[in-house]
Amino acid sequence: MNKPFKEQLRPVPTNELERLRSLGELDLDYLELKKSMNDLSRLAAKIAGTKISLINLIDHFTQWSISSFGIDMSQMPREESICQYTISDESDSEFEVPDLTADDRFNSMDYVRDQPNLRYYFGVPLKINEEVSLGALCVMDSNLHQITPDKKEMLTIIADEIVNRLKAHKTMDDLQSKVLAIDKIKNRLAHDVRGPISGFQGLAEIVRLQGDQNEMEEMLEYFNLIEKGSRSVLDLANEILSQDLSHGENPDSLIQGEGLTLQTLSGKLKDLFTPQAKTKGVQLEVESSDRNSSVPFPKNKILQILGNLISNSIKFTGEGGLVSVKLEMEILGLQQILNFQISDTGSGMDQTKVDEILSGEGSSTSGTKGEKGYGFGLKLVLQLVDTLNGKIGIQSRKGEGTKINISIPIPY
């Protein structure tokens, strides 16, 4: 058994909130990164001469293994990871543990005491800039091991390439966003000018059908109407283009990868967080409304927002409890509104604590099994919801669980 979490002091970078924001800005889908990273995790193990290599991204609660070699690993609680030390202030460029069994920070961990009986660890931070680490590239072995300085330098080069690929994913998403934004402009133009143009066509058809019977005065009136209408359509088109293209200069107003529907979002949430729930002995239910379930919408940090809230609910729900997630979309005219509800049967909070959280002043507390909180998850959620012009409400009572409702409008 691992040591109780409360007995283990966990390292937290001094720039943790900035680090989480940087990870969130990439808006990564951890499930879709594996194929683009597998060659690098394999190469790292071959260079180091170790049996295992992992590429890990670390968020508020969880270490996500976006690629693994030599071991089947997708996630683990952050507080149980070794890589949390690699991204800490204690580690400048690398973190090495020659013998995990001789280190009190790790020798009680299941992966050291039992299979795969790890002994050696070497990790390199994945730095998006000089100050911020998103996670770590690590190599491990069940035997004692040594890595030469030249090979450590090569692993650092691989870590840089991993970060470059993560940035490339973001760039591709942004390019796709701009293409989709332009497509939306095209659709708006087609929708808004179709009616007036049909009217011009009707006038022209009248002139054609009447032929020689057209009076000059009447024809001039028709042509005058067509000319004025054409000018109005050009003005309308210019207005739409100037408004939408000026918005396009602001990344927050662009569509951030229109790859989600309620159906796909539901599947991703189940795939990402069912393992956490099962580990805790908690039931996780994710339900999406049938209405508008196939209508696409922007990613816009939705996975990050819901992921933090689901992890938090699992953290504060005891064994045998329930975490329920409901996903809905309303379409009111041209406006889409995403409605999310995350409820749990956990320990709950009094109104004072709820007010502290909503004001951004809430502090972290331990979960039902002593899981370590880092104090930034809900604060980050509040900031993200606010930047999306959304609303958040929290209902909770001590000992009776918590219900969080989020409403996020989607710009047309």
Image: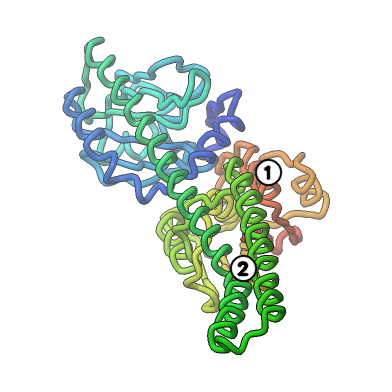
Crowd band around label 2 with a 10 angstrom C-alpha radius: few (<14), some (14–19), many (20+): some
Query: In the structure shown, which secondary structural element does the residue marked by tag 2 occupy?
Result: helix
Please indicate, yes or no, whether residue 321 appears anywhere in the rendered image: no
Horizontal side, residue 312 vs residue 266: left or right: right
Q: Quadrant of the N terminus?
A: top left
**Number of marks present in the image shown:** 2
> Looking at the picture, does residue 393 appear above or below residue 109?
below
Q: Which residue lies at the image location 43% right of the left edge and 31% below the top edge?
A: 135
Please indicate, yes or no, whether residue 92 appears anywhere in the rendered image: yes
Sooner in the amino-acid sequence: mark 1 or mark 2: 2
| Disc 1 target residue | 383
Residue type at the position of mark 1: Gln
Quick one: which residue is furthest to the top in this view? 149
Residue type at the position of mark 2: Asp
> Looking at the picture, does residue 11 appear above or below residue 150?
below
At which x and y percent is residue 226? 65, 71
Horizontal side, residue 27 vs residue 395: left or right: left
| Disc 2 target residue | 192
At which x and y percent is residue 249? 59, 40
Q: Toward the viewer: 91 or 300?
A: 300
Which quadrant holds residue 110?
Answer: top left
At which x and y percent is residue 331? 63, 72
Q: Toward the viewer: 254 or 327?
A: 254
Q: Which residue lies at the image location 66% right of the left edge and 78% below the top edge?
A: 219
CB atoms of marks 1 and 2 within 8 Å: no
At which x and y percent is residue 138? 32, 28
Instruction: Please name which of the two marks, 1 or 2, marks the residue nearer to the observer.
Output: 2
Q: Toward the viewer: 120 or 53?
A: 53
Which quadrant holds residue 402?
Answer: bottom right
Q: Quadrant of the C terminus?
A: bottom right
